[in-house]
Amino acid sequence: MNASTHQINLSRRGFLTLLGTGAVLSPIALAGCGATQQTGGGSAASTGSAASAGSSDLSGVKLTFVGDDAFAPFRSLVTQKDGSQKLEGLDIDVVDEMARRLGFEYEFEPQDFAATLASVQSSDTSFTMPMSANDERRQTFDFTRGYYQPLVGALSKGGEPLQSLDALKGKKLTCTTGTVQNKFITAALPDNELTTFDGGDQCLQEVLAGRVDVYICDGAEGLTMQQANPETVLGLLPAKETDEYVSVYRIMAKKGASFIPAFNDCVGEIIADGTMDTYIAKWTNKDFVWGDRAAEASKAE
């Protein structure tokens, strides 16, 4: 029997649980956040000439980082003391580090997942992250080596942490539409009832309201949500049960994008010198760092 699947198309940005505060922004509060936001190595435009293929010097290159702005801990809008909002997270730290080392400038343009893929595919100067590579995507996009090894999280309301496929059988599940977690559920738990949404924030709301049992998510995202919502419980599934479906997270750009070789080398350097683990530990915890796997990861393709 196939999973009973329902897709609900809602914006990711209608609800945002702020890291460490537990505060929730309404869609009205976020209404001003749709404009392109400059960040990273200085001011930047959404268009600009990219460096020649293979160049490790991207000085003067202007790029656009396209993606969801409600995907903590990778990136999310955090309210500052003066009431302004600032984009923060693991991905922002990583791209800022790359901008310092390579000399490029970038701006962040918030878009939902489906729009992100279309934007990157149509631009020679846009990129997104975190993305898993598969044969289908490699036909259209180029990828760097992996910068982060995800764990699959199971976020539920109360009870004991769910930490295995067996523990999830028979549960009502939710996940973000089109993600690797979506494909993982379809393949590994085909008999479970599944409802998908455009964003993890809606999935969290379904769990909190008791309409579903478990949000299957990126483990680091689930950790952030659990910290902001103490009534929830996070289980991390063992890698041996998920590695077949969930691969390393990478930076993705249009096939042939000339800046990807430089990005690829820089990611390797940031992993090798320990900087990546510093950022990963800052935004998650010790369960997610490369540790003694860093040397191998820095050279892996």
Image: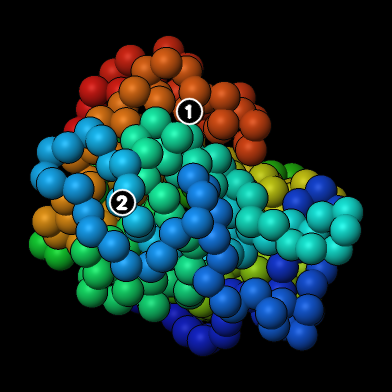
Residue ID for mark 1: 276
Q: Where 104 falls versus 129 (above or below)?
A: above
Front-most of residues 109 and 143: 109
- Where residue 216 appears, as percent x and y from the top left, is 54, 58
Look at 38% across and 68% down and name the residue there: 46
Classify residue 256 as left or right of residue 273: left
Front-most of residues 86 and 181: 86
- Where residue 119 appears, as percent x and y from the top left, is 32, 74
In which quarter of the view is residue 44 placed? bottom left
Look at 40% across and 26% down and name the residue there: 270
Whole-angstrom CA distance, mark 1 to mark 2, is: 23 Å
Identity, as a three-letter code, of the amino acid under mark 1: Met
Question: Which residue occupies the extreme front position in the image?
Answer: 60
Look at 72% across and 68% down and name the residue there: 16
Q: Nearer the viewer, mark 1 or mark 2?
A: 2
The secondary structure type at the circle numbered 2 is loop
Classify residue 203 as left or right of residue 265: right
- The answer to whether residue 301 is seen in the rendering is yes
Instruction: Give residue 61's mark.
Output: 2
